[in-house]
Image (cartoon, rainbow, N blue to C red):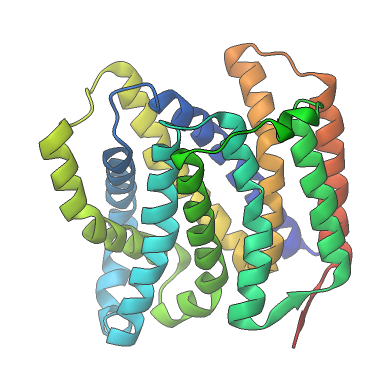
Amino acid sequence: MNSKTSSAVACLLLTNVIWAGNALIARHAGGSDMQPLSMNYLRWLIGALVLLPFCGREIWQQRKVWGQPAVLWRMAVLASCGMVVYNTLLYAAAHYTTAINISLLNTCIPLATFITSGLILKQWPKPAAWLGLLIAATGLLYLISAGQWQVLVSLSFNRGDLMMLIGVLAWAVYLVLFMPWGSRMGLSAMSMLNLLMWTALFIMTPLFVLEVSRDGLPAMNQGNVLTFAYIGVLVSVLSYLAWNYGIAHIGAAKASLSLYTMPVFAAILSYLILGEGLKAYHWIGGAIIVIGLVLASVLGKQRTT
């Protein structure tokens, strides 16, 4: 594993640590006064304002490149899938479904990415990658079922689960299209992220105004301020920069496999923050996930047909 690959893997792991924290916050927000779209809109607004001083000049200088109609509609698709649809539906799903159902449906992301990558880019992984995916998925299912397989049989699905499924499909499209389309924008990774943020905000503004007029803005108490600081800076800025770096160096399909580490990090964060002890199934499930990821990454290099 060369230095760039190692850096990409490290960035992906950092991303999943941050997203694990975001998942905990989403579950908390499900019982608070924060509405899903407003929560998503304000996090991107904070992130966009944080990045603008570092990116504004480059974005302006490259306006003739990214301002072309062929690039603008691609930006709109990427922003809609990766920033608007998935994240809004994630926050919305927490109002209707359980954490175990959300985790289960998120296991579909790598599979959806592999299939989407094959259908759109004609890049299909070797059989070893599918085997690694299956092993990692088995470990994740073992983890979220707390080592009791019968739990999976008794799951019931509601509209929150449907929201997450649609979000998963949108995220897979974002992952697959980011590399080929992002290169057309003529921007650095940070400036491209900032431009996508503003694009997402432009798309969400009418719905945000409608939601605020109906439900009002979230109360700016200490808890909500800390929540927006976390999701606005760490989740919206740092994690996306790290994630995009990982995709650029190892590809969307392999990068999506790292998502199987998120429940492991969520379990660790639950222990550190909530005082919930780590059980044997955490370690067993985590070990199976790692084995699957290693197999898929080392032996499952993509082939083009």
Please give the name of the residue rendered at 54% of the width and 54% of the height, measured from the top-left corner.
Answer: 168
Image quarter where the C terminus lies is bottom right
- Near-viewer residue (264 or 229): 264
How many marks do you count on the picture? 0
Taking the image as drawn, is residue 172 in sight? yes
Along the horizontal axis of the image, is 80 left or right of 203? Answer: right
Q: Position of residue 49 (x, y in %)?
A: 27, 49
Q: Residue at x 28, y 85 (%)?
A: 69
Residue 273 quadrant: top right
Asked if residue 211 is positioned above or below residue 300 in the image, the reply reads above
Identify whether 170 is placed above or below 10: below
Is residue 234 in view? Answer: no
Where does residue 1 sit, x and y in percent of width and height? 84, 62
The residue at the point 59 percent across, 36 percent down is: 101
Give the answer, above or below, for where 130 lies relative to 288. Answer: below
Q: Residue at x 29, y 34 (%)?
A: 35
Quadrant in the rendering for residue 80: bottom left
**Residue sitting at the far top:** 275
Image quadrant of residue 280? top right
Q: Is residue 287 left or right of residue 39?
A: right
**Which residue is at the front of the view, 293 or 27?**
27
Residue 233, horizontal then vertical, whole percent: 40, 41
The image shows residue 205 at horizontal and vertical percentages of: 19, 53
